[in-house]
Amino acid sequence: MSPRSSLSLFSALGIGLGACSGDPGGAQPEMPGPDPPARPVPCTFANATCAERIALGGGLFLPAYTTHLLTAGDAAVTRALIVVHGNNRNPDNYFDSGVMAVANGGAAGTVVVVAPHFQTSDDDPAADEPFWSSAGWKRGNLSRPEGPTPRVSSYAALDRIVELLLDARRFPALRQVVVAGHSAGGQVLHRFAATSGEEAAARAGVRFRYVVTNPSTYLYLGPEREGREGNFTVPAGGCEDYDDWHYGLGDRNSYADAVDADTIRARLVRRDVRILLGDADTLSASLDQSCGANLQGTNRYLRGRTLVRFLNDFDPAHAHTEMIVPGVGHSSRSMWLSPVGREALFGN
């Protein structure tokens, strides 16, 4: 379901017109209807009660579920958790999982949870809501040209959420921003960690963390891939685009190309990135099996471990942390509610 403004769902109810003896006009004045139900704080319902539309600029809005209104802010909030949905584009489920994770971590009330909705045309977006292709939102591409203008990158929309959270007038006590994504959302997060400038622009005292959970693929910072012997070498021919965006740094889209390759490399290796892997996530359902993806490994679990080995070889001082959840497969909720997941999201 696409979140919508609560104003459109809770319009006042009027009493209909009717004839009345003694009233020569036969019309009765409309009586005021009931006030809309108050939005609780924190708001934990994955429905219209907790829906918010985030202004992106240019008259565009991104639907989301939020525990605390980003437009209003909250002085009690010390941490933000942004959860990015997977391929099914189901922000309601991810909002529920984020709220559960916060409660599981014992931080309810002081953590704002934001679950944005990156829509496609199939989601019936409103006229002022950008939408993307089914692959484009994962890669940070611009919204579709047949949608509203100006077109906007899905990663720039994430930037806008972070900007609102970093606004000291709205969230003066904020000390940490955690951005977590599972599956396709995990693909988003690994590339967003490499390209977004919001962390560098954050005010002093605010820490960032990116929790990349069970994605199909990762961003490689060099052309080498693991071969059959376990060594990282440049692959032989036959897969010409394996190192293009979003598998590598070639042929980047407009959002990623606004940052030079050396800066992308520096950002990704220096940032606090948690590679959160379920050791039972070894099946192929909805797995990217393109040529470029298959060069990263045979399943999600192995691809994550291989990416960390690549970084160990090429930049041993990197800040990625591999974290394995035993016995869990391709489930965001099971991953984030596990002890290891709780550590990834809220630990030191």
Image: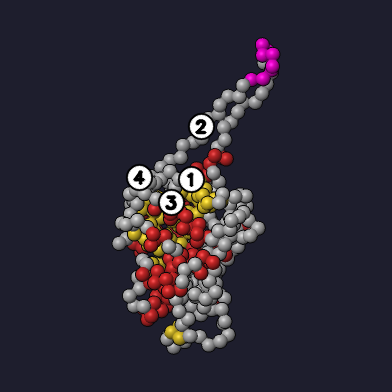
Nearest to N terminus: mark 4 or mark 2: 2
Determine contact: label 2, label 1, CB under 8 Å: no
- Distance CA(mark 4)–CA(mark 2): 26 Å
Q: From the viewer's perspective, is the residue at label 3 or at label 1 nearer? A: 3
Residue 234, percent across and down? 48, 85
Q: Residues within 10 Å of mark 3 (few under 14, many from 20)?
A: some
Q: Which mark is residue 50?
A: 1
Is 321 placed left or right of 16 in the picture? left
Residue 267 as seen in the image, left or right of residue 8: left
Q: Is residue 284 visible?
A: no
Above-or-below relation of 49 to 151: above
Q: Amino acid at mark 3?
A: Leu
- State how far apart marks 3 and 1 are (Cα): 17 Å
Per the rendered image, the range of residues in magenta is 21-28
Marking on residue 164: 3
Tell me where residue 209 appears, x and y as whole percent: 37, 62
Mark count: 4
Q: Nearer the viewer, residue 189 or 60?
A: 60
- Seen at 47% across and 55% down, the residue is 160
Residue type, label 1: Cys
- Is label 3 in a helix, a strand or a loop? helix
Which residue is found at the position 31% from the left and 56% from the top? 205
Please identify the quarter of the rendering in which residue 134 is found.
Answer: bottom right
Mark with earlier residue (2, 1): 2
Q: Amino acid at mark 2?
A: Asp
